[in-house]
Image (tube, helix red, strand yellow):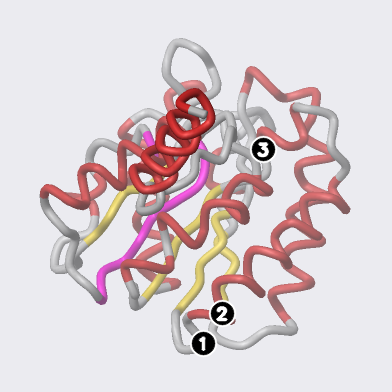
Amino acid sequence: MRHILGTALLALFVLTFTAGAKPQTGHRFEKEIAAYEAADKVSAPPQGAVVFTGASGIRLWKTLAQDFPGLTVINRGFGGSQMEDSVFFAERIVIPYRPKAVVIQAGGNDINAGKSPERVMADVQAWVKKVLAALPDVRLVYLGQGPSPARWEQCEKQQKANALVREFIATEKNIAFVDIWAACIGDDGLPRPEFYVADKLHPTEEQYRVRAKLIRHAL
């Protein structure tokens, strides 16, 4: 009897203790997203800012604030992520901020992982639907995939994904597609080496400045 009573009390204690806790998703990026949420509790970002989200091209943008003077920006990139990851976490790192605009760069890791351009486009559609359902007046900007020396063999699939996403965005309101492909290509028809850091994949500050100029126009 004592054993049964003790077990019941322990179960009640566990339920009470965990009732208010946020369940862990088990997602591979849970740690990064939880870190953003913890930082928000310490210092909550302002509402009505411009959220930048997506893969490492966003996460590594260290000059984001100075590249967008006059705008309040929030960086919520998480490196290595794919478009479906941005869909999964939109309710935690985009929608709560009630932003006036959201800039997203994702899709390159998808192609690198073997996903089709059609799958990239479908996930972009899912992300747009999810964000607009919660924020119907928000301005959305999709930063198209750019070329890189490290993934140059994927350029045809990257460009096809860009074309599909651009076609979809053309049918929507208040969404812009930012094409950075041409700006990253040199006179020799190859990615400009000065636009990439040592890994030949991620942008240099010079490329970020070009990105910022194109995005500001879209915003």
Q: Find out whether the residues at labels 1 and 2 contact each other: C-beta distance under 8 Å.
A: yes
Residue 132, x across and y down, in percent: 56, 79
**In the picture shown, does residue 68 fall above or below 13?**
below
For badge 2, the amino acid type reads: Leu
Q: Is residue 63 left or right of residue 95?
A: left
Within-10-Å neighbours for mark 3: few <14, some 14–19, many 20+: many
Residue 202, x across and y down, in percent: 48, 26
Q: For the magenta stretch, what is the residue range?
A: 48-59
Q: Which residue is mark 2?
A: 132
Residue 146 seen in the current view: yes
Q: Which label number is shown at residue 19?
A: none
Identify the image quadrant of residue 126.
bottom right
Q: Is residue 137 left or right of residue 176?
A: left
For badge 1, the amino acid type reads: Pro
Q: Which label number is shown at residue 108?
A: 3
**In the picture shown, does residue 177 fall above or below 195?**
below
Q: Which residue is mark 1?
A: 136
The quarter of the rendered structure image containing the C terminus is bottom left
Q: Find out whether the residues at labels 3 and 2 contact each other: C-beta distance under 8 Å.
A: no
Within-10-Å neighbours for mark 2: few <14, some 14–19, many 20+: some
